[in-house]
Amino acid sequence: MAFIRRLVILSGLATYATAQTPITVNVGTTNQRIDGFGFSQAFGRAAQFESTASGLQKQALDYLFSTSTGAGFSIIRNRIGSGGSGDSIEPNSPASPSSTPTYVWDDNDEGQVWFSEQAMSYGVKTIYADAWSAPGFMKTSGSDSTPGYLCGTPGHTCSTGDWRQAYANFLVKYVQLYASAGIPITHLGFLNEPDFEPGYSQMQISSNAIEAINFIPILSSTVKAAGLSTEITCCDAVGWGTTATYVTNLVAAGSTSYLSVITSHSYSADATTDLTATSLPKWNTEGGPSSAFTTTWYSSGADNEGFTWANKLAVAMVNAKLSAYLFWEGFEDGETQSGSHLVDSLDGTNATPSGIFWAFAMWSRYIRPGAYSLGISGTISNVLTFAAKNTDGSVVLVLTNSGTSAQSAKVSFTGFTAGVASAWITSQGSNFVSTMATLANGAVAVAIPAKAVVTVKLTAG
């Protein structure tokens, strides 16, 4: 098999030697800031991770967070529980919205405190806390797990009163409790899939986002009054199409002046076009396949294959100009019936990354938080090309070939003189392995096999 893979690579190199397509990266032209890539361990997955045998746990953590051997993920997304005792910091309703609440804190939060500490130990600085719902007693339905709206928002009155300020206080208290544990919550969300009605924690808003528009200034003033620098996000819709509609209305109402990030999921629609109505950073904060865990990179183009997600990432970063992309879950143990996590243990002892994991790693290991995407001229048939400059001055290229034929590129630069180039490839049978990158006269040449991703890191000469 190794011999066959070598023949495939050599075949690609033959193409690379004879038909290089010119691409120019303008380091002086910057597009979106890159905030990072990440995942969640919500709904008890963090606690399961914490209780995993130490050897397996360390392997999984290294795969997820190491910038030398793993993906180097730099964002985690924690869930703010709302489901009562053992899940919420405010499990019981006070006498009224203005009554003093009784908060309950166990310094664990279903393992998310431990998980956050582990992430921080690897250098993670971006921690996104997101509420799927307000506590049930604050909603029109009276339950966190049945459809309902926040009491007091336009068109939604409740016999118990107006709970908008109480919900803002609840969210701020959660951030403060984490701060007391030495964990800074950098981003705060108050909705999750408000355009969907599942059988678990949920809270809805209308298609014109009027409830969010009404609540956002209250949350913003409450965050500021508490002396917090935590940034507010909205609205984690099921897909990009709904998010585009929400953004149109948020911008028209002036709500984006209170926000720092627009958030969306990619279940009903992928991020494929830039939401130009606002200049705020856009994050895809959740996504995953509907089928089983697999290590396959490419076979048929199924939704759980690595290259399927490599192409999603490339389209999202190049065409939709995302600043961050998060998968659903990071690690689960022995849950291979689901492909919505990146690392599993197939034998109970060793951590095994999925094909999707390597799709993310090709971006997240070397494109680091604070990087900016760069202007590019020139195109290659069936290849999406992305370039970013890191805060340390290095330039990283990611080339994704969705075609059935190998391609090659000769990439030159304006405003940057490359001195050293290193390249890696992921394709079927090869996960993040070194590949040839030839640097000559300030340009780097690489081959990109079919259904493959090549990442190139360049440092100045």
Image (cartoon, rainbow, N blue to C red):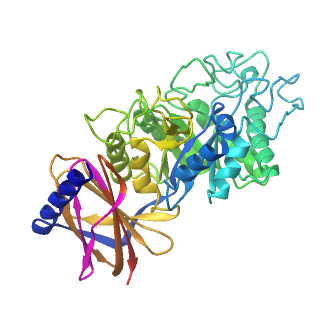
Q: At 79% from the left edge and 24% from the top edge, which residue is drawn?
A: 85
* Total number of numbered discs in the rendering: 0
Q: At 89% from the left edge and 29% from the top edge, which residue is drawn?
A: 99
Indicate whether residue 449 is drawn in magenta: yes
Q: Is residue 31 visible?
A: yes
- Front residue of this view, candidates 352 and 242: 352
The image position of residue 126, as x and y in percent, is 61, 54
Question: Residue extending furthest left?
Answer: 18
- Location of residue 380 with respect to 144 vertically, above or below: below
The image position of residue 459, as x and y in percent, is 40, 76
Q: Quadrant of residue 388?
A: bottom left
Task: Please give left or right for residue 107 compared with residue 328 in the image.
Answer: right
- Front residue of this view, candidates 289 and 384: 289
Indicate whether residue 435 is drawn in magenta: yes
Q: Is residue 254 visible?
A: no
- Front residue of this view, candidates 31 and 314: 314
Q: Quadrant of residue 163?
A: top right
Q: At 40% from the left edge and 67% from the top edge, which residue is drawn?
A: 30
Q: At 64% from the left edge and 49% from the top edge, which residue is drawn?
A: 127
Q: Quadrant of the C terminus?
A: bottom left
Q: Quadrant of residue 300?
A: top left
- Location of residue 369 with respect to 37 vertically, above or below: below
- Location of residue 350 with respect to 96 vertically, above or below: below
State which region is magenta.
Answer: 433-453
- Front residue of this view, candidates 272 and 334: 334
The image position of residue 264, as x and y in percent, is 49, 39
The image position of residue 58, as x and y in percent, is 61, 49
Task: Please give left or right for residue 308 compared with residue 342 in the image.
Answer: left
**Is the stretch drawn in magenta largely helix, strand or loop?**
strand
